[in-house]
Image (cartoon, rainbow, N blue to C red):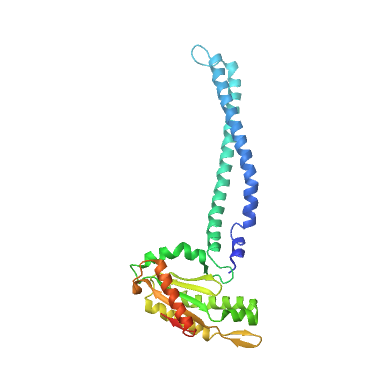
Amino acid sequence: MDYKENLNDTIYPLNFILRYVSTKRDELAAMETATLRNMLQLKDCSDTLNKFITQNRNEDGTLSAEYVDKLLDFLTECQKKTATIGHFMTNKSIIFEDMNNMLRQTQALTSDIIMHDELTLAYNRYFYLANADKLYESAVDRNGLSMAFIDIDNFRDFNTNHGHDFGDRALKHFSNIVNDNISKYEQTYLIRVGGDEFVILNGGDLSYEDFVECLNAISTSLSSSPMEYDGNKIKISISVGAANSNRANTSSMLELYKLTDGKLYQAKESGRNRIVA
């Protein structure tokens, strides 16, 4: 799914929202001015009405018949002003309700866009920074937070030998296979932290053993699903370092991060295409 297209294909297209807000901003300003003017006129009308009644009523408090028509004219004018003000207030409420609906929709969609990598549609570094500590804390009383650092082996060669377009295809291919394997698990996130470097987090839905088994399944799926380039099949392999907060008895997300990163280094140093867990 293209999140930019998604933003423009919803109930309120983005370009419509921008035009609507721009137009209604001026309309609201005009309504405010008109409402204030009518409220002042209504006050003048009310003051005039009170003055008229005071000056023209009989000793018993009643109005003479000759003044009744004038009184009705005053009341009609006051009613018109009141109705105009009510009309403006209703229109303003509708406009504000529409704007609030648009704002809620746009916030949700833009938040989704901000949290995702545009190329692979995996979550991005911003998502990691915003959520990693919370996931760590919430996983303590479950199976602990399981974390994997993943590098695509020899990814630089993909760009050098086959071009950056193929490198982009490889990143998308990798992301699709990972998501196919993790989508059935709750609180499991693929995060692109930069280049060909990815993180997988599981917030305690899986035991660490099951998490490692899932990583092995990903590696196997990649090996059995080569990409084609100029009639050749090119396999993608990965190096993975994994750790679990409860299993390693870490005290913070940062400590788990460093431990997992160290295991990735071991996997790369020991020949790549392997999982160190």
Q: Residue 249 appears at what percent x and percent y?
A: 33, 71
Q: Residue 158 appears at what percent x and percent y?
A: 61, 81
Depth order, front residue of 146/254: 254
**Is 105 drawn above or below residue 164 in the view shown?**
above
Q: Residue furthest top?
A: 59
Residue at horizontal 56%, vertical 53%?
102
**Is 147 drawn above or below residue 23 in the view shown?**
below
Q: In which quadrant will I find the N terminus?
A: bottom right
**Is 49 drawn above or below residue 9 in the view shown?**
above
Regarding residue 186, the answer to whether it shows in the image is no
Q: In which quadrant will I find the C terminus?
A: bottom left
Q: Residue 99 appears at what percent x and percent y?
A: 57, 50
Depth order, front residue of 251/189: 251
Task: Give the number of marks.
Answer: 0
Residue at horizontal 43%, vertical 78%?
263
Depth order, front residue of 262/14: 262
